[in-house]
Amino acid sequence: MNLFAETRALVIGALNDMVEAGELPGGLDFAAVAVEPPRDAAHGDMATNAAMVLAKPAGMQPRAIAETLAGRLNGRGGITSAEVAGPGFLNLRLLPASWQGVVRAALGEGRDYGRSELGRGTKVNVEFVSANPTGPMHVGHVRGAVFGDALASLMDFAGYGVTREYYINDGGAQVDVLARSAFERYREANGLSPEIAEGLYPGDYLIPVGEALKAKYGTSLLDQPESVWLVDVREYATAAMMQMIREDLALLGVKMDIYSSEKSFYGTGRIEAALERLKGLGLVYQGKLEPPKGKLPDDWEEREQTLFRSTEFGDDQDRPVQKSDGAWTYFAPDIAYHYDKVERGFDLLIDVWGADHGGYVKRMKAAVSALSEGRVPLEIKLIQLVKLFKNGEPFKMSKRAGTFVTLRDVVEQAGADVTRFVMLTRKNDAPLDFDFDKVLEQSKDNPVWYVQYAHARVCSVLRKAAEAGIAADDATLAAADLDKLSHEAELALARKIAEWPRLIEIAARGQEPHRIAFYLYELASDLHAHWNRGNEDITLRFIQGDTATSQAKIALARAAGVVISAGLGILGVTPAEEMR
C-alpha cells in the first residue's frame, strides 16, 4: 500500500476529468504532478503541486487551476477537503480511516510493506569495493562497502533485479609488488632478514603468507631469480589477500554475488573484442595526445598511440587504450570489463568508487555510452573520505596494516551494526567523521542507538502484552478495531509510517540509501515522542484497560516496528529486541 501514490492517482483522475470537461487543454503531461507531505503539518495531510506545474503548459493561472481541482477533489476517495494555498498549491486532508488503513497494511504486509515495483524488469549491476588484492581493506573501503551493499538492498526492495559484483584488480603492477613483498616475508620465515624496500607493502599481514609459502616451497625459492618465482608467489599471495578481503566483508555482513577478475581479460581476446567494437563505431584511431597544460613532466614525449574518442561523449580529451609499445593502458581492461557487463544484459550499471577516482569518471561513462550505443547508463558514485576519532584525537594507524586503519579495526571497535548505520548517516559524496566515543554512546545524538531503542521499545510493548494475556500477533492486530486510533498524536505517527513506501521510491530513484537512515531517525523520534506523551496522558499508552483498545494501540506501535525493522534490513543492521 502506498497512500501517497493512491492519492496522486485521485489527483490525476480529477485532472483527466477537467480535461474532458474542457477545464484544462488536452495533451498535458502529468508526469511532474506530485503528492507529498506538506512542509508544515498544520496545512494538511498532503499537498500537490499540480496547478503550479501545469499552469505554464496550460496557459492558465495556477490558482484558477487549483480552485477547479479543489472542487473536484473535495470528497473524492478518502479526501475530506482540498484547500488552495498561496499562488496555487493545494493542501489535502484525509479521513482518519486512511491513516488507520496504513497501520493495517503495514501489519498485513509485514517487512514487505513499502516494497515497490518501480524497477520491475530492470537488471542492475552494482559494482562496489573492488579493492586491490594487496592487503586488508581499510576504513575508506568500509564506507564504500556499506554504501554499495545498502544501495543494492534498496534497489532490490524497489523491485530491481540486482547483482552485487566485486572487480578484482589483479592484472596490474600492484600485484607484482605484492608478490615481491610476500617473497620478503617468505625469506623471513626461512630465518633471513626481510628487505622491505621503499614501495613494497610493509604490513604484518603478509607474515602468515610468507610462512605458508615456506610450508609449500621450503627453501627451494631462496636462491632463485625473480623470473622463476614471481608468477607462483603472485598467484598464491593474491589468493590469500582475496580470502582476507572476503573474511573482512563477511565481518561487515557483505556478500557478493560475483567476483570478476581483471587478469581474465588479458591474453584471452576480450580486450581486443571490446576495442574492435569501438573501432567498428569509428571511435578508435591512431593519434597523438596534446601535451599536458603547464610545466611538462620530465618523462613527457609526444608519441603515437591508440586512442578512444571519448571527447565525443563529453570527456575533456581522447584517452589512450594502447601504448606505442603495444602494451595496454589501465583503461583498456576496464573498457573490456564494462563491455562484459553490457553483454551480460544489464540495463543499468552502478560503480561505487573512492573519491580519488573522480578524474576517471568521464572516460568510463563515455566508454559505456559508446559500447552500449547509449542504451545502458553508467552511474558512478564517489565515496568521500572517513575521518576516525577516539578520545577526541585522530585514531592511530594500524600496526598490522602498516600504513592505515583496517576495516577489521573499525568493526572490532564499534561492531558491524553501528559501523554500517553510521556510515550511512551522510550522503556518499560528503565527508564523514566517525567518532568511536559518540557512535557508542546511548543518547538521542547517536542515531543508531536512537533507532535501535525505538525498535526495542516496540518489542517491550509486545512482551508486556503477552504478560497481560493480550493477543498481539500481527494477524490479530491487523484485524483489530483501528477506529480507536483517533487521537491526533496517533494519526500523526501513522502519517509518518505512510511515508515509507514513497521514501523507498525517492531513495531508489536517487540511489541514495542515506535517506533510509534519515527517515528511520525521524520515525524513531516520532515513536519516542508518542511514548513520552503516554507518561502524561494515560489514554495514549499502548496497554489499556480493555483488550480491544490495547490491541488497536499496540497495532500502531507494531506497525512502526515493522517499518524500522525493514529499514534496518535495507541498511544491513540487525534490529534490537532489547537494550542493555
Image (tube, helix red, strand yellow):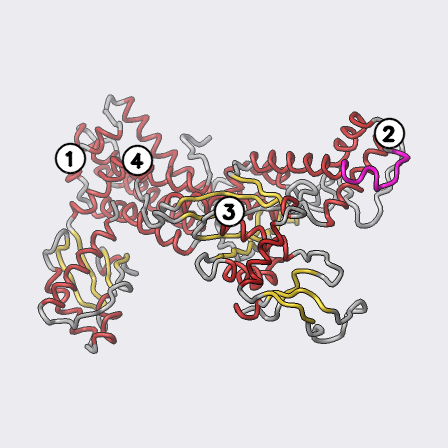
Disc nearer the start of the sequence (4/2)? 4
Residue at 18 percent of width and 73 percent of height: 63
The answer to whether the residue labelled 4 contacts the one labelled 2, judged by CB atoms less than 8 Å apart, is no
Secondary element type, mark 3: helix
**Type of the residue with mark 2:** Ser
The answer to whether residue 469 is left or right of residue 413 is left
Residue picked out by circle 4: 110
Give the class, few, some or many, for how many residues have Cα within 10 Å of label 2's Cα (few <14, many ≥20).
few
Q: Which mark is residue 481?
A: 1
Whichever of labels 1 and 4 marks the residue nearer the N terminus, that label is 4
- Residue hosting label 3: 148
Separation of disc 2 and disc 3 at Cα? 44 Å
Q: Position of residue 248 (x, y in %)?
A: 60, 36
Residue at 49 percent across and 52 percent down: it is 342
Kindly check if marks 1 and 2 are in contact, taking CB atoms under 8 A apart as contact. no
Residue sitting at 88 percent across and 30 percent down? Answer: 191
- The amino acid type found where label 4 is placed reads Gly
User: For the residue marked with disc 3, what is the amino acid?
Assistant: Gly
224 magenta-colored: yes
On the image, numbered disc 2 is attached to which residue? 220
* Residues at marks 2 and 3 touching, judged by CB atoms closer than 8 Å: no
Label 1 and label 2: CA atoms lie apart by 80 Å
Few, some or many residues within 10 Å of mark 1 (<14, 14–19, 20+): some
Asked which secondary structure carries label 4, the reply is helix
Disc 4 to disc 2, C-alpha distance = 62 Å
Which contiguous range is marked in magenta? 222-232
